[in-house]
Amino acid sequence: MLEYQGWIVIRESLNERDESDELMEEIWHNLAVYVDKINSERGADICQMKITNGNYKLMIGGLDNRKTSSWTKLVEFFNWIAVEAKGSYGLVHFLMMKIRMV
């Protein structure tokens, strides 16, 4: 079983000096396209995007019966965020368990 949950604040830069509204809009749009792809592949809304008081946030949560290619796709997604939105930070927890049926 693979369980994951967490949040990420999306920022375009590590400091305010390098931030721009245009760049943030582009990142947010590209992120929305990626999130739509992930959610449609999964058939569920495992990712949700939200803007609160000017802060751009991504929430993620899901549960898979087994570690499949979804694990690799999630890691690729987080790596994409790290490259495209360099100032982003957050916390994502993963729990992998082996369950024996007796």
Image (spheres, rainbow, N blue to C red):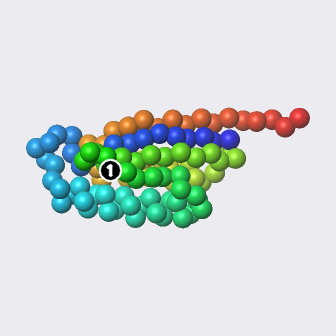
Could you tell me which quadrant the C terminus lies in? top right
Tell me which residue sits at (76%, 36%) in the image. Answer: 99
Question: Which element carries disc 1, helix, strand or loop?
Answer: strand
Q: Residue furthest right?
A: 102
The answer to whether any part of residue 1 appears in the image is yes
Q: Which residue is mark 1?
A: 51
Q: Quadrant of residue 28?
A: bottom left
Tell me which residue sits at (50%, 59%) in the image. Answer: 38
Tell me where residue 55 appears, x and y as whole percent: 28, 45
Above or below, 100 against 67 in this view is: above
The answer to whether any part of residue 10 appears in the image is no
Tell me which residue sits at (52%, 40%) in the image. Answer: 5
Tell me which residue sits at (53%, 45%) in the image. Answer: 61
Tell me where residue 9 appears, x and y as whole percent: 33, 43
Tell me where residue 43 appears, x and y as whole percent: 60, 62
Q: Identify residue type, mark 1.
A: Ile
Left/right placement of residue 79 relative to residue 13 reads right
